[in-house]
Structures are given as structure tokens and as C-alpha cells.
Amino acid sequence: MNSQPVPGGSPPPAPPDPTETGIAVRAKGVWKVFGRNPERVLEPKFRDLPKKELQRRTGCVVGLRDVTLEVKTGELFVLMGLSGSGKSTMIRTLLRLVEPTAGTLHVDGKDVSAMSHKELLEFRRNLVSMVFQSYGLLPHYTVLENAAYGLRLRGDEKDEREARAMEALNMVGLAGWENYYPASLSGGMQQRVGLARALAKNPDILLMDEPFSGLDPLIRRQLQDELVDLQSDIGKTIIFVTHDLPEALKLGNRIAIMRDGQVIQVAEPEEILSNPHDEYVRAFTRDASPARVFTASTVMEEPDMLLYRWQGPLTARTEMERQKREWSFVVDRKRTYLGVATRDVIERLAKAKHTTVEKEDLMYLEPVRPDVVIEDLFGVVSSESYPLPVTDEDGKLLGVVRPRAILNALSTGDDDA
Amino acid sequence: MRDFPTWIRFPVADSVDRAMAWVLANLGWFFDWVGDVGLQILIAVERTLLFIPWWVAIIGVGVVAWRALGRVRSGIAMAILLFLVGTFGYWPHAMNTLSVVIVAVVFSIAVGIPLGILMAWNNTARNILTPILDAMQTMPSFVYLIPALMLFGLGRVPATFATVIYAIPPVIRLTNVGIREVPASVIEASTAFGAGRWNLLFDVQLPLARPSIMVGVNQTTMMALAMVVIGSMIGNRGLGMEVLLAINRVNIGQGFEAGISIVFLAIVIDRITTAFARPKKVEEATGEDTEPDEAEEANASKAPA
């Protein structure tokens, strides 16, 4: 795993169980039932009852129903659902801020569900950090003291914890604010303090419970972008709870959709959109803009016609006649993209008795990369009468994007509506 | 039929009398000892107060009030009120009264804050303590004088005892309320970072409950002052005794002087403790311009971990 040595901090982690390698969090059959005698809900006669029926007959409310999940090391895993779907309860069971009624939880290879109170305190102090929607900062501590609070609980010396907290504050862009109190900071900045407090102890796993939900959209987008950057820099495992589909789609490597305490689909963002598991997920995804999810690679197609550089203009003219086309993409050996040849150009070259079609003769249409989201292609597509060429870093033509394909992708999920 | 049947009797009075007699017979030595220690403390405090020259005390109170309230005018006003008490010829009586109030309040805080914490932590403790506190506050304060008199005899010790019982509920209640009103989100976040029960208490709950607790201390102090007159019925001297004497002699002038002295004392104490109850100003403190006393306060709040 990616835990760096912590000077003067926790003891070196025990060698991970070989079967656990690559798995940061594993939840198996986790239940959370609120109410009196919650265990009886697990009995066969109750456990499969729907939520309302169960509440009527036992007075208990099911928060989590038999949740099984695996989060890979280094992954940004999103738990998504509406309020009451159990997503916040789920993330809290990982630190046992909520005690699960049944099931096992392994975090970083350690069995959290079996920990004693003392082990649990140690676990919370060292391996996992959490960021909260309501920030949860201490109002009587300065920004620096807040950022260092986790380190203080862990027992770090004052100098060391302040140095580390400063480092974390720099990382989230709050250098210079360390002596202010949280009350004088904006919401976005307070959440940065929350993030710095979480990062200061260099945890293996970062839990984030709707961290950006209380912020206004611009700040929110900015923090999302920064989180993506941060994630690629430090490569932590992040479990991120949100009720906002665009946010989930933007951030998540994988997304788990929850409803009524159950996980109903775990998939990569694109699959959630293109292949929703059921009506619930479909309804959820309906107002998500696929333009922000689909990339050029999702919607690109094979070109109808390709000309090769070494084919002479006469061959080209014959091909065009046969296929009744007015233009074509031209490629080199290894399919390196060269440009677009129109019928006029070919005619001119044929008259001039050229034997090959050279790059200088062609119209050069700026190609796009396969990972560009299609929202960014709107402007380009609508201003060109040709499809967009998609190339990789070496200039190889991978395919073309036609406006029609984009429109089709945008209407995905609405077909049946 | 309209009268309550005479044959249904549940003689609580007898039981209370018998319990009291048993306590006196078997635990008398304990209360004697407590009474002795209490008396030594009360006398020591009173002597200290009387040892301070009157002008030092007046200037000192003026300066403290000025610092606490932030206005020179307030400081001077408080000093003048105390000066007036002296001009009535009640300086020693006021110091006697003050010694009882101080000892009662310190004892109330020392017992009340831990009880308030217990109440906040534990719902069973709260359910047991709440009706007891209700009873302590609604019971006519004279009633406390009887057991106090029986346990400690006459004098300032039973008066202090009765004062504590009468005055302790607010500090218990407001400590409880203050801790319970600490936002759950802050508690949860601190817990998530591995704060145990005592970390939570000293880092989070007590600092955030501080304004509420200070209001409790203020109310407890006010109630202790109010009890002082009643305490004089069992032999406490001081301002209360002067009021009582004036009533007995129907001496309106003397009664007014003694009464207004208590009021002045109350105003001075109330203004100063209220000022301490206000939440600290925390907004505009940056590294360079942090005032030394603010920095000290911040350090002090960090210490008890």
C-alpha cells in the first residue's frame, strides 16, 4: 500500500494479508438497523420485508441492508444516493461512528468491526481521515490548531504537528490564514481547513461525506477540480459520498448507487449512464448531462472512407466516384492523420499529373484527443461541416466524431421516456 | 363526602423527623467535623477580605470592572457603588456577606460543574437530577434552614450550607444545557479523528459550553446573594442581619441602607460575572496583532489535554 513512513508517528503497519492486496475497504453483509432490539430484524421472517412493512411490524428502521462493497487501493469511489438512501450511514460505519448491526468491515486490511474501543481510537487517529459536510471545525481553535488537531490526538509533538499542519494548509491553498479563527473564513475556506485537517496525518484512506454540498456552485467546482488534482498527486484511496450525480460522474473512478440502504449498482461512470441497472438508476441519471460524462472515444466511429497518401489522385477520384463522396480523410502509413482531401483538390491534382497526395495539398482539420468530454466538442462540431478526427498522442487516427453521434449520446436514457 | 377521608394518612413528616434524628445520632461527628472545617474556611476568607484596605478593594474592583466591561465609566460606576456601601457604615458587614457568598459559590461551582457534565453525558443521571433540581428551586428557601440548623447549629456555616443548596441548581442546569447544545457535527468530527471522552470534554464540550456555564455561574452568584438575608435568620451576621434587625425594629431608614447595600453588591458582582460570560471575541486575531492576554487565553484553553 502507499503509506509513507511517518517519522515519530504510528508503528509500521503490519504486512497486509496477501488476499487483501489492492483492496482498501471491504464491507461484507453490513446491516444497520435503528430501533429497539435491532438484531431481530435479521431473523428470516423479517429480513426480506420492505422498509415500510418492517417499520410497521417491528418499529425498526433499516439504515443499511446487507451492503457488500469493495474499494480498491488508490481509487476514488463514490457512494451516491438520495437522502435516506444510507450512503452517509455507510461511510460512518467505516469509522464506527455508526455501529453496524451485523456484517464485517475491513479497512486497510484491519477488521474494524471487531476492534475494541482502544483499538478503534488508535485506528481513527492513524489510518483514516474524514471530511464532513458541516466542516466540524473547533471554533475556539485557529486554522492551524484545527488542522493539527488530528495530530495532537495522535500524540505528535507541538513543533512537528504544526509543521505538518502547515504543509497540509499549503496543499489546500490556505497558507497565510493559519492564525485566523474559522468564523472569519468563508464556507469554502472552512472546508479547505477540514480537508487540511484530514490530510495532515497522511492517512491511507480519506472519507468524504458530501464535503462540497454546502458550497456555492463555483467554489464547489473549483474544489472538485482541486480534489481531482490532489488525488492524482497523492494517490490516496478516497470514498466520497454525494447526492449529486454530475459530481459523482466527475470525480468517481467507480460509483455505487444506493437506495433504501441497499447498493443497487456499482459501475464506472459511463456504464451507469449508458447501462443503468434499473428504473431507479435511470431516473437518477435522467437529468445528468451525458455531455459531461461521455468522451470523444465513447462517440467516435470508423470513418466511412479513408485515402492513403501513396494512392495517386486518379485512384482517389475513382474511389470517390464509386462511393459517391465529396471528400475523405487522408492517412499515412500506420494511419497517421494527415488531413482532409476534397473532390476539388483531387481533381486539381489529377490534372497536374501528381502521382501522390501530399500533406501540403490537404485541408488540415484540427484533431481532438479521445479523452475530451463531448461538452467541449460542441463548439468545434457545430462550426465544421466535416466530422472531427480523433487522434492519439502519436497522431494516429482513431476514429471520427460526427454531430449525429453526439446527439445520439446526449439522448441516451431518454429513449424510453 | 367532599372532604378528604381522615383515615387515609401517609405520615411523611414522622419519617422525615425520624430520619433526621438517626442522622444526628449516628453521623453527628461527621457534620461537626464538616462544620468546623467550613467555619475555618469562612473565617479565613472573611479575614482576608477585611485585611485588604478598603481603598485597595474599591480601586481593585473598579479596575477589574473596567477591564471586564471594556469601559472606564463602568469601572468608576462600580467603584462608586462599593464606596457608597462603605459610607453607610456597612463595610465589615458587606465583607462578611461576601465571604459567605464566595465560599458558597466556589463550592457550588466545584460540585455543580461535574454534576452538570454527568447530567449531559448520562440520560439516567439527568432523569434523576432534574426533579431534584426542580424541587431545590421551588422549595421555599426557609425550609432549608431547618436541616441546616439541626446539622450545623447556629451561625454562618448552616447559612452557607443553605445558600449552596438554594444557589447550586443554575450552574448544574446550564452546564448540562451548554454541553448538550454543542453541535453534534463538531463532536462527530472530533470523534472521527480519534478523540476519546476526555478529549471531547476538555477540547470541545467545555470550551464551547463556556458561555452557558458562565451564565450559570452568574445566576448561582445572584441567588447566593439573595439567600444571604434569609441565612441571617439562623445567625449569619452581615448585611442580611442588618436588614432583619431593621425589620424587627420597624426602622425604615436602616432597612433601606442595608437593603440597598445588598443591591449594590449584587450589581457589582452581576456586571463583572456577566462580562466574563460573554463569548470571547475571536474574529480579527492574526499572528502579529494578537494581544498578549488573548494569546494567553488561547494557551490556557489548550492546556488541559
Image (spheres, coloured by chain):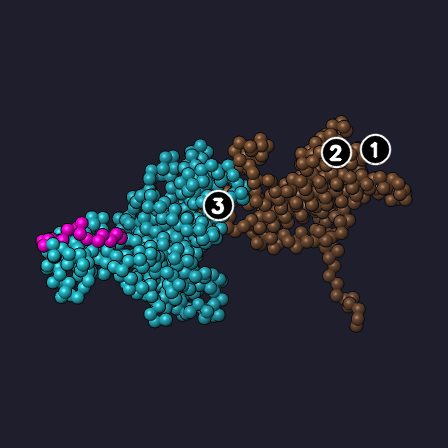
Chain colours: A cyan, B brown
- Between disc 2 and disc 1, the foreground one is 2
Residue on which disc 1 sits: B87
Tally of marks? 3
Give the magenta range: A353-369
Q: Amino acid at mark 3?
A: Gln
Main SS, magenta residues: loop
Q: Is residue A336 above or below residue A161?
A: below
Q: Chain of mark 3?
A: A
| Disc on res. A190 | 3
The image quadrant of residue B70 is top right
Tell me whether the residue at label 2 lies in contact with that at label 3, contact meaning CB atoms closer than 8 angstroms: no
Query: Is B233 left or right of A393, judged from the image as shown?
Result: right
Question: Does B116 lie within the magenta span?
Answer: no
Q: CA–CA distance between discs 2 and 3?
A: 42 Å
Mark 1, Cα crowd under 10 Å, few <14 / some 14-19 / many 20+, is few
User: Residue A413, how many percent across, how many down?
Assistant: 34, 66
